[in-house]
Amino acid sequence: MSEASTHPWDDDKFHEECGVFGVWNVTDAAALTALGLHALQHRGQEAAGIVALDQAGIFHSHRARGLVGENFSDKKVIDSLPGRAAVGHNRYATTGETALRNVQPLFADFEFGGFAVAHNGNLTNANVLKRELVKRGSLFQSTTDSELFIQLMAISLYSAVEERLIDALRRVQGAYSLVALHNKALMGARDPSGVRPLVLGRIGPEDGAHSWVLASETCALEIVSADFVRDVEPGEIVIIDDTGVRSIKPFGRTGSRFCIFEYIYFARPDSVMEGIPVYETRKRIGAELARESNVPADVVVPVPDSGVPSAMGYATEAGIPFELGIIRNHYVGRTFIEPTDQIRNLGVKLKHSANRAVLEGKRVILVDDSIVRGTTSKKIVEMVRAAGAKEVHMRISSPPTTYSCYYGIDTPERGKLMAAQHDLAEMARIIGVDSLAFISLDGLYRALGRPARDAAKPAFCDACFTGDYAIPLTDSLESADRQLSLLHSAQ
Ligand code: SF4
């Protein structure tokens, strides 16, 4: 399970997981990978890494804590990563501590040569597998679950890289979108439920041959001028080499359960995921929200930045003016000041300011994407009231988040999720609003172009709203069993 965020400015959000990127057959592969990672920076800000493969078959890597711009804007660093193929990773620590040894891409030397892998997602049987492997002699170099791909490949009895990877993927449970690089190919893989995104893009042709890109989101294709080809399918492995792209689907078909929260909050608004444009979807969610729970008001105000498109959709549907009543300071960096408790309390004010000219004397509808612990919402409402708002109504473009995510999103434990602990009226009282409403689950599905949620076969993963976990939570169940048996033995 994930670590708590230590970042004071937005520690009351679910946090993005990681971003992965890979290129094949391009000049300056590392520079392009740095650009791709930069476009995916919203998916992870703790560390970034690139592994490049040069023409002589030698791998070069640079991995460091911090942002992509901090680590890869120096030409000397890019020059130290020569080659026409590379993979990269932005890390948000969903498992394992934030030590350099956990920064990806991970790399290992096999008898077939070097192998680098970057993972977005979270494995739900990692502890069980790790114990088994350690017992049989595997020496883990990191504390991240992503190392399991390498360790499982290392004990595979197959000799071909592809077969070894398939062998490893058969053993793991959970969510994964991978990019991997070895001497002969760039590979991409998605778990059979396709929880996390991965897209294929193409550049070129350069010298008569196409160049290929794999990325977590389409916004990373844009920045390197690649054309979107398609989403990598759930359960699919794509193998890209000088002959082109091959696809294998070794795991049979299971229902796709793409993370519905990507549309609400995680993805960049200019991305298109599984054929659905994120920005338009957020506006449609806002319109649904207005249809479901509008109240008379003077202004619709987004909690920036992620609340903006849904507030626009809400305002248009409700016929109420959209105004920027809260201004975000984009220059609050993590290096600004140390996050002492005092500064932590000031965090919301450092990041957001109330625009008194818009708010004073007004009945305000505040639109935000989610309520996690509720602490930030409370402070924002206090700030809006202090700026003279007459009434404050909060509208949320996700259903109440009542369960934790085990598939690669940093969420607090269930006991800290406000909606898991309080009913709507209590939440409204604690946050200090005149009224509070969340979009319904069916409304969310409607905004995504479905008639409603089909409980027998949901089209998306929505477990943080429903508790309907499609992929077994093996580690969590096992740890609950252990605690229970410890309790029994203590009695
Ligand atoms: Fe996304 Fe929620 Fe499913 Fe996690 S539990 S993958 S955040 S929808």
Image: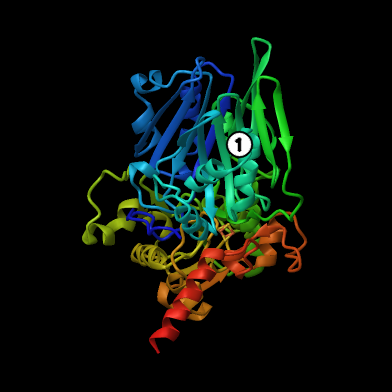
Where's residue 397, x and y in %? 57, 60
**Which of 319 and 450 lies nearest the eye of the viewer?**
450
Image point (45%, 50%), residue name: 137
Image point (32%, 45%), residue name: 332
Check the image and report above or below for 278 versus 173: above
Where's residue 123, x and y in %? 54, 54
Can residue 46 be seen? no
Where's residue 381, x and y in %? 40, 66
**Which of 126 and 382 lies nearest the eye of the viewer?**
126
> Can you name the residue that lies furthest to the bottom here?
491
Give residue 342's quadrant in the image. Answer: bottom left
Packing grade of label 1 (10 A; few <14, some 14-19, many >=20) is: many
Check the image and report above or below for 142 versus 482: above
Q: Quadrant of ligand 1?
A: bottom right
> Can you name the residue that lies furthest to the top here?
207
Q: Is residue 54 left or right of residue 328?
A: right
Q: Is residue 267 left or right of residue 412?
A: right
Amino acid on which the number 1 mark rests in the picture: Thr
Which quadrant of the rendered structure holds the C terminus?
bottom left
Disc 1 target residue: 218
Where's residue 305, x and y in %? 47, 49
Q: Secondary structure at mark 1?
A: loop
Check the image and report above or below for 426 versus 37: below
Give residue 333's quadrant in the image. Answer: top left
